[in-house]
Amino acid sequence: QKEVEQDPGPLSVPEGAIVSLNCTYSNSAFQYFMWYRQYSRKGPELLMYTYSSGNKEDGRFTAQVDKSSKYISLFIRDSQPSDSATYLCAMSQSPAFQKLVFGTGTRLLVSP
Amino acid sequence: ETGVTQSPTHLIKTRGQQVTLRCSSQSGHNTVSWYQQALGQGPQFIFQYYREEENGRGNFPPRFSGLQFPNYSSELNVNALELDDSALYLCASSLDMGYNTEAFFGQGTRLTVV
C-alpha cells in the first residue's frame, strides 16, 4: 500500500465548476501538507501549504486537512481552462518541504 | 520562473550506460533534493543534500549517487542505466532545511533509456 493515495483521474469539468481533489495517507507522522500544480513538461509549483489540521484559503483555492481521518482536500472555485493541469498532493514530516511524499497526481481538464 | 535550472532538458541513453544530470539551485539555497517522476506517477524522493553532505535517501539503489558543490549546485549520477530509469528527474532547492521554507522545483530533465 502506498503512503499517499490519490485518484489519477482524469477529472473533466465545465468552466465555472467547483472542483474537489482529495488524497488519503497512512503515515500519522506527516505534519505538513501541500498541493502542487504541474503543467505538462514543467516542474511542480506550490499552490497551497498547510500545517496540521484545518482549512486555508487563497483566492479561488481552499485546502483542508483532517488528520484524524488522514484525509486532505483541495477545492477550486470558479474553475478556469487555465486550471487544466495535474494536481499533486504532497506531505512531509518536520521540517516542511523536505523529503516530500507525493500522491500519483490527478489530471484536471476544465473545458470552456 | 523559480530560479532553479536543470540541464540537459532531454537526454537519451542506452541501457547499461551512465548519466549525469545537473541542477543549479536558486541563489543562496543550501539544500537540494532530487526526485524521480515516472510517467503518470508522482515524484519519488531520491536523496537530499544539505551543505554538501547527503542528508537522507529514499528507496533507490546505490547506483543512484549525487554530489553538491560549494556553490550549492548539484549533480545526480546514475550508473548501469535500466529501462525503468526512464523518467523526469526533478531537483528542488530550498533556502535552508531547518526553516520550513518552500522548496522550488526546476523544470526537470527527461531521461529516456533505450
Image: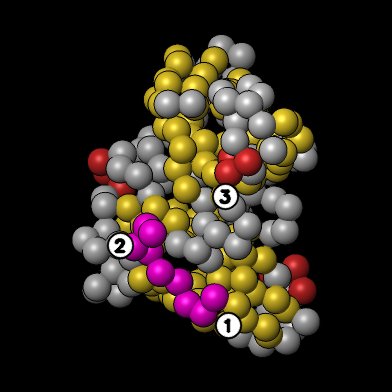
User: Tag 2: residue type?
Assistant: Gln
Q: Quadrant of residue A56?
A: top left
Is B7 within the magenta? yes
Residue picked out by circle 3:
A38
Distance from the alpha carbon under mark 3 to that under mark 2 = 19 Å
Residue B53 shows in this picture:
no
Q: Is residue B105 above or below residue B110?
A: above
User: Tag 1: residue type?
Assistant: Val
Q: Is residue A45 left or right of residue A74?
A: left
Marks 3, 1: nearer the viewer: 3
Residue picked out by circle 2:
B26
Distance from the alpha carbon under mark 2 to that under mark 1 = 23 Å
Give the residue drawn at x 48%, y 35%.
Answer: A34
Dot 2 and dot 1 within a common chain: yes
Mark 2 or mark 1: name the one nearer the start of the chain.
1
* Subunit under mark 1: B
Main structural element of the magenta stretch: helix, strand or loop? loop
* Subunit under mark 3: A
Q: Which mark is residue B44?
A: none
Is mark 2 in CB contact (under 8 Å) with mark 1? no
